[in-house]
């Protein structure tokens, strides 16, 4: 792992929060992700499943975590199963965790090799009344591939069909949605690395550069700071490319007079940062660019002010829509008649601002979290309003990462130049 080893108290605290919400005499099981093949003997770089990471920090393939807080044997209340290394694996892939290393990372004292899994799991399961199975129940998930946890769930149901079964996801959405102080420390590091990346590209941006060159500058800075790279596929969209919300080709030239929309964030220790900025290629906004940019910035700042403890996310998004409606009326992009006759299911402002304003952020870019409870201290959200005008070749989005505090918020990414004045001054250096 490239990042500095995280404080194992993160994972000890996360397990405690999860098991506190389990029903009595239950166990829960979590598996690592697969290593996904490409073709021939190729495969994609390994990316660990965020649930087992959240609960153990085990950043290694073929890992299994079993939690049984009411187990009679104290040694079986938390068990981590790992792939055992050997000389051949060490030569070709590098050594895997030792049992001592796994304890240092996770705080879990009982570590077995995978060869012991069926025997040990059976001893645990026969003393449990119910088993919590894990899956992917994210609102945005659309998965057609059978995943490792799917295969594990099938095996458990086949061998332990007389047990009661529960879902881990409702608990995970509750506990992962609110970050601990130690988790926030890691997210601040991801934000710091992301800030360095934006400062680097601001010095590099000029007429004639290519979007992929800017992507390379980000990656250079991220890797130099012990990040494994992008938290998600980066969007670097010059000119009219910014009106494609998920533009990821990054293959065009940046021309004098263009704005470039950057939706780029680093990950650190698997925790993500998600930031969007729009910068003028030549260092100066035109009057029209500045007019629309400041309208987006006004909604952005108003949305951040709204995002406080106690508000419901559905109500928050409606209020942000009202802010955007006001700005679009001022710009003359919509009329009062448009608003009066709008479809409540697709308000008039959606013509120019068609996506949501905020999502949970954490181990996943679109992280777990409940929309059915009020916003509370420790939650982390993006705030990312935008205005997209294809007929003008102008697309602007501004995004920061906001931690909810007891009395308001902390902006993790405020240091990245954001106002017209800050951007122009920085680029003039």
Image: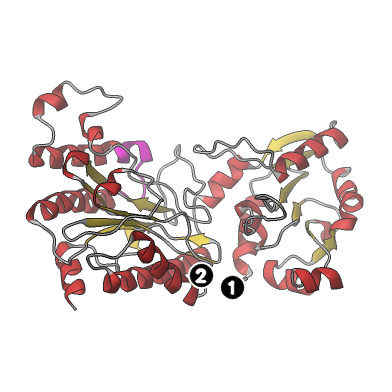
Left or right: 371 in relation to 105:
left
Label 1 crowd bin: few (<14), some (14–19), many (20+), radius 10 Å: few
- Residue 334 higher or lower than 204, as above or below: above
From the top left corner, tell me how far across and down residue 282 is, in percent: 17, 65
Left or right: 320 in relation to 149:
left
Camera-side residue of 317 and 388: 388
**Quadrant the C terminus occupies:** bottom left
Q: CA distance from mark 1 to mark 2?
A: 7 Å
Camera-side residue of 46 and 354: 46
From the top left corner, tell me how far across and down residue 373 is, in percent: 45, 40
> Hey, which quadrant is residue 404 in on the image?
bottom left
Instruction: Work out whether mark 1 precedes mark 2 in sequence or the reverse, and give the earlier one.
Output: 1
Q: Regarding mark 2 in the picture, which secondary structure is present there?
A: loop
From the top left corner, tell me how far across and down residue 82 is, in percent: 79, 61
Residue 272 located within the stretch drawn in magenta: no
From the top left corner, tell me how far across and down residue 400 is, in percent: 33, 57
Left or right: 399 in relation to 78:
left
Q: Residue at x 40, y 68 (%)?
A: 218
Q: Residue at x 74, y 43 (%)?
A: 24
Q: Which residue is mark 1?
A: 2
**Quadrant the N terminus occupies:** bottom right
Q: Residue at x 82, y 38 (%)?
A: 155
Q: Residue at x 37, y 40 (%)?
A: 313
Number of labelled discs?
Answer: 2
In this picture, which residue range is highlighted in magenta? 307-317
Residue 407 appears in the figure:
no
Q: Are marks 1 and 2 in contact (CB under 8 Å)?
A: yes
Camera-side residue of 362 and 245: 245
Q: Which residue is mark 2?
A: 227
- Residue 69 higher or lower than 184, as above or below: above
Q: Regarding mark 1 in the picture, which secondary structure is present there?
A: loop
């Amino acid at each position: 792992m490239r990042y500095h080893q995280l404080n194992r108290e993160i994972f000890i605290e996360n397990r405690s929060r999860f098991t506190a919400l389990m029903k009595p005499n239950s166990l829960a099981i979590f598996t690592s992700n697969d290593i996904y093949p490409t073709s021939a003997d190729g495969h994609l770089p390994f990316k660990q499943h965020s649930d087992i990471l959240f609960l153990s920090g085990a950043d290694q393939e073929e890992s299994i975590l079993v939690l049984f807080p009411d187990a009679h044997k104290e040694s079986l209340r938390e068990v981590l199963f790992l792939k055992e290394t050997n000389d051949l694996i060490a030569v070709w892939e590098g050594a895997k965790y030792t049992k001592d290393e796994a304890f240092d990372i996770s705080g879990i004292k009982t570590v077995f090799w995978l060869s012991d899994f069926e025997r040990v799991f059976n001893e645990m399961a026969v003393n449990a009344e119910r088993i919590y199975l894990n899956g992917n129940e994210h609102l945005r998930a659309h998965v057609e591939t059978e995943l490792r946890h799917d295969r594990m769930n099938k095996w458990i149901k086949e061998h332990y069909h007389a047990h009661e079964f529960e879902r881990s996801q409702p608990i995970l959405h509750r506990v992962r949605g609110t970050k601990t102080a130690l988790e926030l420390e890691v997210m601040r590091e991801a934000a710091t690395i992301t800030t360095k990346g934006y400062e680097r590209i601001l010095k590099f941006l000029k007429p004639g550069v290519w979007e992929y060159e800017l992507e390379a500058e980000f990656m250079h800075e991220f890797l130099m700071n012990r990040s494994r790279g992008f938290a998600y596929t980066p969007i670097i969209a010059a000119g009219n490319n910014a009106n494609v919300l998920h533009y990821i080709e990054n293959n065009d030239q940046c021309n004098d007079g263009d704005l470039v929309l950057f939706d780029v964030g680093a990950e650190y220790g698997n925790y993500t940062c998600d930031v969007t900025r729009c910068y003028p290629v030549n260092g100066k906004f035109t009057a029209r660019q500045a007019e629309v940019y400041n309208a987006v910035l006004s909604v952005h700042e108003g949305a951040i002010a709204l995002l406080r403890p106690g508000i419901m996310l559905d109500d928050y998004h409606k209020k942000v829509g009202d802010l955007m409606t006001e700005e679009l009326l001022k710009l003359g992009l919509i009329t009062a008649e448009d608003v009066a006759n709008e479809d409540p299911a697709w308000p008039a402002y959606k013509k120019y601002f068609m996506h949501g304003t905020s999502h949970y952020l954490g181990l996943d870019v679109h992280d777990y979290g409940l929309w059915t409870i009020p916003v509370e201290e420790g939650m982390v959200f993006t705030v990312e309003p935008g205005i997209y005008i294809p007929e003008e070749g102008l697309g602007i989005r501004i995004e920061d990462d906001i931690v909810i505090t007891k009395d308001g918020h902390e902006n993790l990414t405020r240091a990245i130049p954001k106002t017209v004045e800050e951007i122009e001054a920085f680029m003039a250096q």
